[in-house]
Amino acid sequence: MLPKVVMPENAVSANLLIRHSEAAPGKIDEQRILSRKGVSLCYDMSNFYKLLITHLAKLLRIGEENIRYICSTLPRTLLTGEKLLGKLCEPNSLLDYIALWELIEDGEWEKRHDKEGIDLITQIQEIIATPNIMEIPEFVQQQKNHFDFLQDSSKKFRLTVALGHEAGLSMVAKSFVNEDDLGLNELDSYLVWLDNNGSPVSIQKIIPIKF
């Protein structure tokens, strides 16, 4: 069963921002591909997202030709688009991953949290709630890149489906969702409704289920 989705009155377009599936370990992060579990997860959630995208197109009263499929330039998002949606997504560097964790306290923050076994979503919530971290120039740039992406995509297509990375996607959502909804597990997503100016008017967290 799909989650209840309501299109706001002042919304004219939408972005479905999906976090990539599980990636295999690798020495060079930019070259990591999906793990076997990540591929399997894509197949499990494929029907959910295909039905959701069809439902969103109906709400927007558009056809398939008005839906744009985008990913970052990293292999794990491109592969997620292929396995999850059956689409060859167009790479866009505004969605690219920046190794932000390594910038906090010269990497000591990440080491400490990993040692304590703190999960990624809790780390994301802590980062976004800490002003001096969010003021790090690279964090500011990452957030700006994602909002620039939203504005650009809304000018060209009524519905954009984008495969991206956790930190950037949650930075988009941070002012629009409850703290408990910050942070995405693999293949979770944010549905972003946009107005005529390409500015978000509401954001809903989507947690897929196997159909």
Image (cartoon, rainbow, N blue to C red):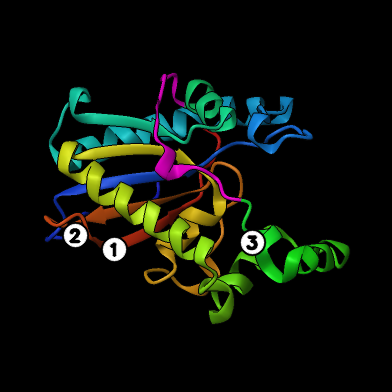
Quarter residue 56 falls in:
top left
- Which of the two discs, 1 and 2, labels the residue nearer the N terminus? 2
Q: Which mark is residue 77?
A: none
Q: Check residue 87 for magenta coloring.
A: yes
- Given residues 111 and 187, the one toward you in this image is 111
At a point 45% along the width and 34% down the height, the residue shown is 48
Q: Disc 2 designates what residue?
A: 8
Marks 1 and 2 close (CB-CB < 8 Å): yes
For badge 3, the amino acid type reads: Ile
Q: Disc 3 designates what residue?
A: 121
At a point 55% along the width and 32% down the height, the residue shown is 74
Q: Secondary structure at mark 3?
A: helix
Q: Disc 1 designates what residue?
A: 202
For badge 2, the amino acid type reads: Pro
Q: Secondary structure at mark 2?
A: loop
Which region is colored magenta? 85-98
Callout 3 environment at 10 Å: few (<14), some (14 to 19), or many (20+)?
Answer: some
For badge 1, the amino acid type reads: Ser
- Which of the two discs, 3 and 2, labels the residue nearer the N terminus? 2
- Residue 110 visible in image: yes
- Residue 1 visible in image: no
Quarter residue 115 falls in:
bottom right
